[in-house]
Amino acid sequence: MLELAIGIILGGCAIGAGLAMIAGIGPGIGEGNAVAKACEAIGRQPECKGDVTSTMITGCVIAETTGLYGLVIAILLIFVAPKQFVNILLENIK
Amino acid sequence: MAKMDPVVKRETEYVALWVMAVCILIQGVCLVLHWWNLTILWGSLLGGATAIGNFLLMCRMVQKAVLQDPKQAKNTVKLSQGLRLMMQGLILVLAAVLTTVFNIWATAIPLLIPRIAISLRELRNAKKNPSPDRPAIGWDDEEDEED
């Protein structure tokens, strides 16, 4: 029974980590679209390159951190959470 | 290697200052709570260096991509984002595996600082320079327009 419980914990953590990594797909696509539009804007008005680059950097940082949050959560779910959950389970059994 | 744009330099300096301040804050908080050990120092150094390096690479990528044609820029950005995410993932795995050398929390926290720093600056700028008021449109006006 204990093995089954530990297996469920490990499986749940692995599934959660996989789901969290879905967040890593979106930012790349979003950033790509934003930069493509920025290129068009600079093509139309080359004099505003500095402003567009600055705005792009702001946008890219904000978009990219979403993926990073997912990554951090996935890594914590794989390497940190199982140990904690198993300890809680063992303490409750005792 | 292309010359660094002044905008990129300014933004990187700003983010680097914030990351360093947060790393020092983490050390201070851990010292006060008697949690401090060398793993926290090494962890925050690794996390801080990765956060600044990632931001610098992203800025260089944007600087390069805005001069390309839109389709090529899209692909460059996607590739760069994937590679940088992988690099950060590897760093986090390294910190999670080598628990005797790096503290995972002290490594992960500085990675999230650039967004907070940029968002705070945007908030401050928005407070300093509020956008010009738009002409107020009341409920009745909208109804009149529909009619």
Image: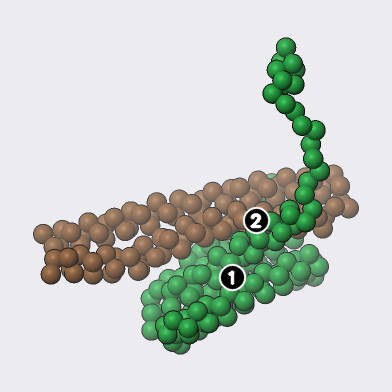
Chain colours: A brown, B green
Marks 2/1 same chain: no
Identify the secondary structure beneath mark 2. Answer: helix
Quarter of the picture holding the N terminus of chain A: bottom left
Q: Residue at x 75, y 17 (%)?
A: B145
Quarter residue B22 falls in:
bottom right
Q: Position of residue B65 (x, y in %)?
A: 72, 56
Q: Position of residue B98 (x, y in %)?
A: 40, 80
User: Which residue has dot 2 on it?
Assistant: A60
Identify the secondary structure beneath mark 1. Answer: helix
Q: Is residue B87 above or below residue A66?
A: below
Quarter residue A61 falls in:
bottom right
Q: Chain of mark 2?
A: A
Q: Is residue B83 left or right of residue A11?
A: right
Q: Residue at x 52, y 77 (%)?
A: B26
Q: Is residue A86 above or below residue B81?
A: below
User: Which residue has dot 1 on it?
Assistant: B51
